[in-house]
Amino acid sequence: MRKICIGIAAVALVASAVGGELDRRWVWLTDSLVSTDCVERVSGLVRKAKACGMNGVMFGCGIEFYKHWPKVRRDRLARIRATFDDSGLEMIPVMWALGYGSMQNYGVDYVEGVPVEDVPFIAQGTNAVWDVALIKKVDVKPHRRYRYAFEFRTKGLVGEKPFRVIARDACLQQYLEKETIDVPFSPTQDWTPCALSFNSMDSNSYYLYIGFMAGWKEGDFEVRNVTLTEAPPGNVLRRPGAPTVLRNVATGETYEPARDYVVPKVRYSVSRQDLPPVTLALPPGSRIRPGDRLLLDCYAPAVVNGRQVSMCLSEPHLYESLEDSATHTEAALHPKRWMISMDEFRNGGTCAACRARGLTMGQMYADAVTKAYNIIQKVHPGAEVYIWSDMLDPNHNAVKTYYNCRGSFEDGWKWVPKDLIICCWYDRKSDLSMPFFSSKGFRTLAAAYYDEKPPFKWSRQWRDVVRRTDGAIGIMYTTWRHAYDDLPAFGEMLNKQTEK
């Protein structure tokens, strides 16, 4: 068996008391700090949390980009920080949602890429443009980009809004929607064009779907002119780990980047569905002649669900950006606890840099987590570091096949520092996830609530699991809808006895 070495900081196992505690009673809060009323809004929620018996707030405000903030946004954070200090509540910054493309502002080319092969171009003047003449309706082939297009109209339609367009890999045994867009509509609407672009990855077969998952109540919904065609990428990545190869169809000659052709900068947002085809510039001295037919192999941004991109875990510049980001966060807040938000990593392992490492996704993810952990320790020695549980949890997303990722996420927990504190958040699996991490020597924190109403069925279960799990240190009121009306009742629930 080939040995695989991943650099991990040497850490001691954390001793756990028998049974867990509810000492850390935190609240999840996010705000971009760009509106004029944000200081009053956030400060009011901090004071409310204090009144409800909470003692900390996991606060997401885009702090990883503090270096680039204007003075007015920095001043707002300083005023909010003063409210935290006055109330005695701790601010735990949330940062680095790399699975959702955080850090693109440092380098948009650092996103994960998928291979796209044999994209046809033709030389015209000083450019090489997508060669429409070579494209026709095709069956799905591996490593191609496709455009699924149609027109729809409605008449008196009453139903779930919006309707959904899905491209799903038919070669997978489990159900995963590799690409999805939600399309808004009016009850009565004339013929309207719509399209979904997707990458076929390693597959040769896809299910394509248009419609309402739960049907509609009344009215008409019509679709016409449905086509599936190969399509060019709207963006091509430009980094060593995502190389391009351009060759002449007739002669097989391979051309040199920069000398013979120039790939344009990545256009933002990389997940946009309506980007026009990439055009390659032909600089003076290029060996490409007018009329030459060309084929391009490249890497396009990996996109899932029509919007989500992830950062490439094998890109060295990403970690330079993380260190720069952490340095500025430390200077601004000096936090003794940090939350790294590396959840739902739905793209990975597909670019040349990732494939060359010969690691599983679990190993690459663990290596990235360890590097992030070590960066925080470098700028703030002894800091506590928290992380979402899902990509390390075999009861959740740490599984063999996950979305657009190439390779298994299994066993990643084996290679991360043992003094990471795992924030478990899958409510239906709380009684499996928290004991699992406890048995492996990790401390845990329960992310409860998720906008359920009293009497808090799942949050009460979280509370009880915390109390009986070794190394569990607390619980968090976690709202995805900015809903804080239930916070007082949640605080009261935490003080009640465990239910039989």
Image: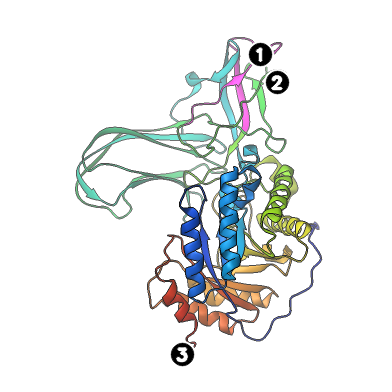
Vertical placement of residue 446 versus 381, above or below: below
Residue hosting label 3: 500
Along the line of sight, the residue nearer the viewer: 395 or 484: 484
Separation of residues labelled 2 and 3 (CA atoms): 72 Å
Q: Earlier in the sequence, mark 1 or mark 3?
A: 1
Q: Secondary structure at mark 1?
A: loop
Q: Earlier in the sequence, mark 2 or mark 3?
A: 2
How dense is the environment of label 2, judged by Cα within 10 Å: few (below 14), some, or many (20 and up)? some
Q: Which of pointers 2 and 3 indicates the residue nearer the eye?
A: 3
The reply to whether discs 2 and 1 touch (Cβ–Cβ < 8 Å) is: yes
Decide: few, some or many residues near mark 3? Use Cα within 10 Å; few <14, some 14-19, many ≥20: few
Under mark 1, the amino acid is Ile
Residue 354 or residue 333, whichever sits in front: 333
Residue at 60 percent of width and 79 percent of height: 23
Residue 29, position as x, y percentages in the image: 51, 61
| Residue 420 in sight here | yes
Kindly identify which residue carries mark 2: 255
Q: Please state the extent of the stretch shown in magenta in the rendering.
A: 275-298
